[in-house]
Image (tube, rainbow, N blue to C red):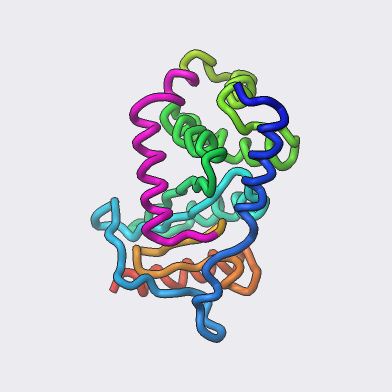
């Protein structure tokens, strides 16, 4: 079990690592995206994948989450959104596991609540014990949570998330990859959450080609 001091250190490191940053330095002029060259393959054949790279410790990811929820409701039928949790250091891996555990438990509704718990209620959900105690208050069986959290399936998805972050060279969150061909972010879109999603909309037709 991690000591309170270690948890504070890991939390501080996670918050520092998830600053509002993206590969904007690679953009030219007023261009609000960067091309991915060579393009990366999709895990969903026949669909335009929009990957949102996020971290639960990132306040900007928390702020943009309601906008992402609204955006996906009106996305074109050939577009699929996949949210990819990022770990910039070893202390953030449990947060990746938490996301995929929520999906495995069929409780995606708790995704946004994790942001609220961390950023709005200042709960220290940085290890399995704290997460399990919190999720039990959300009507999830604690024993089932513990089992799924450490399952092979969740570990495999965490590994895939890390592979994607490496492949896309993710330097900060939130960042959006469109169709394996383009990358954008709020920073690149004029420091605007709304602007980033508008840029995603603009890139989708380009990604189809």
Above/below status of 116 relative to 81: above
Q: Nearer the viewer, residue 126 or 74?
A: 126
Above/below status of 151 relative to 142: below
Classify the position of the N terminus by image quarter.
Answer: top right
Q: Nearer the viewer, residue 40 or 120?
A: 40
Q: How many marks?
A: 0
Q: Looking at the image, which residue is at 49% across and 19% down?
A: 146
Above/below status of 8 relative to 173: above
Q: Looking at the image, which residue is at 53% across and 49% down?
A: 88
x and y percentages locating residue 76 in the rendered image: 40, 60
Q: Is residue 59 magenta?
A: no
Magenta stretch, main secondary structure class: helix
x and y percentages locating residue 147 in the rendered image: 43, 18
Magenta residues span 145-171
Residue 25 visible to an observer of this rendering: yes
Q: Quadrant of residue 51?
A: bottom left
Q: Is residue 159 magenta?
A: yes
Q: Residue furthest left?
A: 45
x and y percentages locating residue 197 in the rendered image: 54, 64
Q: Quadrant of residue 130?
A: top right
Classify the position of the C terminus by image quarter.
Answer: bottom left
Q: Is residue 161 left or right of residue 192?
A: left
Q: Residue furthest bottom?
A: 29
Q: Looking at the image, which residue is at 29% across and 56% down?
A: 42
Residue 138 visible to an observer of this rendering: no
Q: Looking at the image, which residue is at 51% across and 33% down?
A: 98
Q: Is residue 199 left or right of residue 122?
A: left
x and y percentages locating residue 23 in the rendered image: 52, 69
């Amino acid at each position: 079990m991690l000591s309170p001091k270690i948890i504070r250190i890991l939390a501080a490191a996670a918050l520092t690592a998830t600053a509002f940053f993206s590969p904007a330095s690679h953009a030219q002029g007023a261009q609000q995206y960067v091309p991915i060259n060579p393009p990366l393959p999709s895990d969903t054949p026949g669909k335009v994948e929009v990957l949102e790279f996020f971290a639960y410790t990132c306040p900007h990811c928390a702020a943009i989450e309601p906008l992402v929820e609204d955006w996906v409701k009106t996305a074109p039928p050939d577009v699929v959104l996949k949210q990819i949790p990022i770990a910039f250091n070893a202390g953030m891996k449990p947060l990746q596991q938490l996301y995929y555990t929520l999906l495995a438990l069929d409780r995606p509704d708790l995704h946004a609540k994790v942001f609220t718990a961390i950023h709005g209620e200042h709960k220290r959900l940085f290890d399995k014990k704290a997460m399990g105690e919190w999720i039990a208050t959300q009507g999830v069986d604690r024993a089932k949570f513990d089992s799924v959290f450490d399952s092979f399936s969740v570990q495999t998805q965490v590994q895939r998330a890390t592979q994607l972050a490496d492949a896309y060279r993710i330097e900060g969150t939130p960042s959006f990859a469109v169709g394996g061909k383009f990358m954008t972010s709020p920073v690149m879109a004029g420091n605007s959450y709304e602007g980033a999603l508008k840029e995603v909309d603009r890139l989708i037709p380009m990604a189809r080609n």
